[in-house]
């Protein structure tokens, strides 16, 4: 089976490189995740590649298929387990599925969403804060992140959040990702948070989550976060953008939103202190 796909430009190097072995990380009807072993081909690039349906959240490391999850459930194409090989490179992701060989080929590219700069509006920060107040995120830890007085304390607060929660993207990681993206969008300096992610994420959390955190340090993210950050600064209509972010995943959207709010709050504390 040959399936065309649109590839993130972030995957250009790893897809254009020689074929490398990979391992399965997870599968659902709308997304497949693999971790690439670069050591076997002396190559560099993203360590995680996602294959997602057309209606799935568009991760910055994704190959997007033309069919929806209802039209072509991806989990039905994928035999999970270490004995089933998957390969990435030469413009494709391929594996031996239950019904024979499956090849997902990159035929065109798209550029990942990136947060834009601007100062958040207080009323929009409060609207998002109100919307997420009952989601059960560890707000004591988020508050510690906001109030960290120096780079070392900020790094420690991030370390406490990394890997907290179940799943391929634990909610603690989503908070940190939202914080990094909000900091970049709102012009906040958070060197401790960036350093903690660079030094700890690979060993502190899942491979997929660590990859998405690395994208976040560069301001790259799913479109819903970029749009919500723009709404917080008045660049977009707020209600629809914030609702779309909160609808991402089971808890990911709300946790990302908590991170955006935390980043905005860092600026508020600085402003109060300056006064």
Image: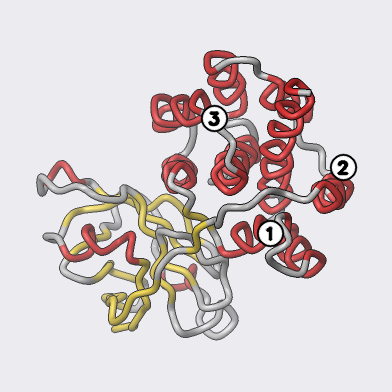
Query: N-terminal of the two: label 2 or label 3?
Result: 2
**Mark closer to the observer (2, 3):** 3
Numbered label tally: 3
Query: N-terminal of the two: label 2 or label 1?
Result: 2
Q: Position of residue 271 (x, y in %)?
A: 74, 29
Q: Position of residue 232 (x, y in %)?
A: 73, 55
Q: Secondary structure at mark 1?
A: helix
- The residue at the point 44 percent across, 26 percent down is 195
- The residue at the point 63 percent across, 52 percent down is 118
Q: Secondary structure at mark 2?
A: loop
Residue furthest front in the image: 275
Q: Is residue 137 left or right of residue 174?
A: right
Q: Is residue 38 left or right of residue 235?
A: left
- The residue at the point 39 percent across, 32 percent down is 202
- The residue at the point 34 percent across, 82 percent down is 3
- Other residues around mark 3 within 10 Å, as few (<14) / some (14–19) / many (≥20): some
Residue sitting nearer the eye, 118 or 57? 118
Q: CA distance from mark 2 to mark 3?
A: 24 Å
Is mark 2 in CB contact (under 8 Å) with mark 1? no
Occupied quadrant, residue 190: top right
Quarter holding the N terminus is bottom left
Residue hosting label 1: 228
Q: Position of residue 44 (x, y in %)?
A: 19, 47
Residue 133 - label: 2
Residue hosting label 3: 190
- Other residues around mark 1 within 10 Å, as few (<14) / some (14–19) / many (≥20): many
Q: Is residue 247 visible?
A: no
Q: CA distance from mark 1 to mark 3?
A: 20 Å
């Amino acid at each position: 089976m040959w399936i065309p796909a649109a590839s993130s430009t972030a995957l250009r190097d790893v897809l254009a490189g020689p074929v490398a072995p990979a391992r399965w990380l997870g599968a659902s009807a709308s997304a497949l995740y693999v971790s690439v072993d670069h050591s076997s081909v002396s190559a560099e690039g993203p360590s995680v590649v996602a294959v997602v349906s057309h209606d799935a959240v568009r991760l910055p490391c994704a190959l997007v298929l033309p069919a929806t999850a209802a039209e072509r459930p991806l989990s039905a194409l994928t035999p999970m387990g270490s004995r089933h090989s998957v390969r990435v490179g030469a413009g494709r992701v391929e594996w031996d599925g239950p019904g024979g060989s499956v090849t997902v080929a990159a035929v065109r590219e798209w550029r990942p969403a990136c947060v834009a700069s601007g100062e958040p509006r207080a009323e929009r920060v409060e609207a998002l804060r109100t919307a997420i107040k009952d989601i059960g995120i560890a707000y004591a830890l988020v508050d510690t992140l906001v109030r960290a007085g120096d780079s070392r304390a900020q790094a420690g607060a991030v370390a406490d959040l990394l890997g907290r929660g179940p799943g391929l993207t634990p909610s603690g990681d989503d908070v940190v990702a939202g914080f990094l993206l909000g900091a970049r969008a709102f012009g906040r300096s958070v060197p401790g948070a960036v350093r903690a992610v660079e030094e700890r994420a690979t060993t502190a959390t899942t491979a997929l989550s660590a990859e998405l955190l690395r994208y976040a340090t560069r301001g790259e993210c799913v479109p819903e976060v970029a749009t919500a950050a723009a709404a917080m600064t008045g660049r977009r209509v707020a209600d629809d953008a914030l609702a779309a972010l909160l609808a991402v995943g089971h808890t990911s959207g709300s946790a990302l939103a908590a991170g955006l709010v935390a980043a905005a709050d860092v600026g508020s504390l600085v402003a109060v202190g300056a006064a």
